[in-house]
Image: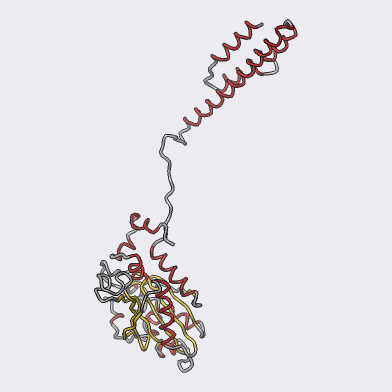
Amino acid sequence: MKEKINKYLEEINSFIAETPDQLEAFRIKYLSKKGIVTGLFAEMKDVAPELRREVGLLLNDVKNKAQDKVSSIKDNLAQKETSTDKSTDLTLPANFLNIGSRHPLSIVRNDIIEIFSRLGFTVEVGPEIEDDWHNFTALNFHEEHPARDMQDTFFIEKNPDIVLRTHTSSVQIRVMQNEQPPIRSIFPGRVFRNEAISARAHCIFHQIEGLYIDENVSFADLKQTLYYFATEFFGTDTKIRFRPSYFPFTEPSAEMDISCFICGGSGCKVCKHTGWVEILGCGMVDPNVLENCDIDSEKYTGFAFGMGIERVAMLKYQIDDIRLFFENDARFLKQFTSAT
C-alpha cells in the first residue's frame, strides 16, 4: 500500500500539463469520485490497524498535492493565456494620464467674474458677429470714426453693416435694449481687431466689460467699484489713479492705472519706470447711449468699464508675449496645472 502511494506521489510531482484538457484529465484521474484518491481511501479497511495512521497521513498528502498541482497548473495556464492575448501587451509601459490644467485666460476670467459677482453683477453674453448699430452707432461712434475703417475692423464679406465685434460693448447695448434699470452686469467674451500680431497685440483677444445703470449713479460709485476690484485681484496694497481719456460711449472718460505690484512703485520694465500700469478704460455712460436704448437719461445715470483679459493675465503671471496664450504649447500651459 505504501509503495503504491509513493508511486502516485512521484507521478503527481512530475506531472506537467500544457493544455486545459490535459489538466482536466489529471483532475478526473486523481480527484473525481471514482478517482485514485477516493479508491485509496476505500482500501484503508484492508490496512493493518497499527499502520492506518501512517498510511492515512500519506493518503492526505496524495490528496493535498494533487489539489495543489491542479490549482498551480490552472493559474499558470491562465497567465499564459493572458500573456499571449494580442489585445493586452504587458510589456508595454504604463499609459499615465496627465493632469489637466485650466488655461490662464480662463483662470483670470473666472477670478474677475467671481470678484464682481460679490457686488451683484450678473454675467451676460452676446454674438461675436454683430451689426453696425450694436457695434458702433448705438455706442455713439460717428460715421467718420477710424474704428469703422477696414484697417481696424474685420467686415464680413465686405458688408459694411456686418462685422466681427471689436468690443463686448455691443452686449451692453443688447442688454440695455432688452432690460430696464437697474442694470448691473459684466460682459466677458472674445473680440476681434484688424491689428498686426506681435508680442503686445493680437487680432483676437478677450475683454470683460461692466455696466451699472440706476438712479443717482455717480463717478464716485465707479471709483469705489474699481478700487474694490483692484485690491481684491492684485492685493490690498494696490493703489489706483484715474487719468482723463476719451471714449465715444462715456463722458467723462478715464483710464485707470494701478501701482506696479512688481516693483512696488519704484520703477521697472513692466511699468516703464513710472510706477504705474494701465489696466482698463472707464467712464460715465454718455446720455446719447442711454437714449439710443430707450433709457431716460434724465432719470438714470450709469458707469461702464472694460479691460483686456490678456493684459490682466500678463500682469498677474508676468508673461511678456501675448502670443503664448494662443499657441497651445503644453510646456507653457502645464505651468497652470495647480492654479485655482
Question: Between residues 305 and 273, which one lies in front from this camera angle?
Answer: 273
Residue sitting at x 52%, y 25%: 76
Q: Does residue 317 sit above or below 129 in this rendering?
A: above
Residue sitting at x 46%, y 80%: 174
Residue sitting at x 31%, y 72%: 264
Q: Does residue 82 sit above or below 187 in this rendering?
A: above
Whole-percent x and y of residue 114?
47, 71
Q: Quadrant of the C terminus?
A: bottom left
Whole-percent x and y of residue 223?
40, 83
Image-based side of 312 in relation to 70, left or right: left
Image-based side of 29 in relation to 335, left or right: right
Image-based side of 285 in relation to 321, left or right: right
In which quarter of the view is residue 37 placed? top right
Question: Between residues 4 and 301, which one lies in front from this camera angle?
Answer: 4
Mark count = 0
Q: Quadrant of the N terminus?
A: top right
In which quarter of the view is residue 262 placed? bottom left
Question: Between residues 106 and 268, which one lies in front from this camera angle?
Answer: 268
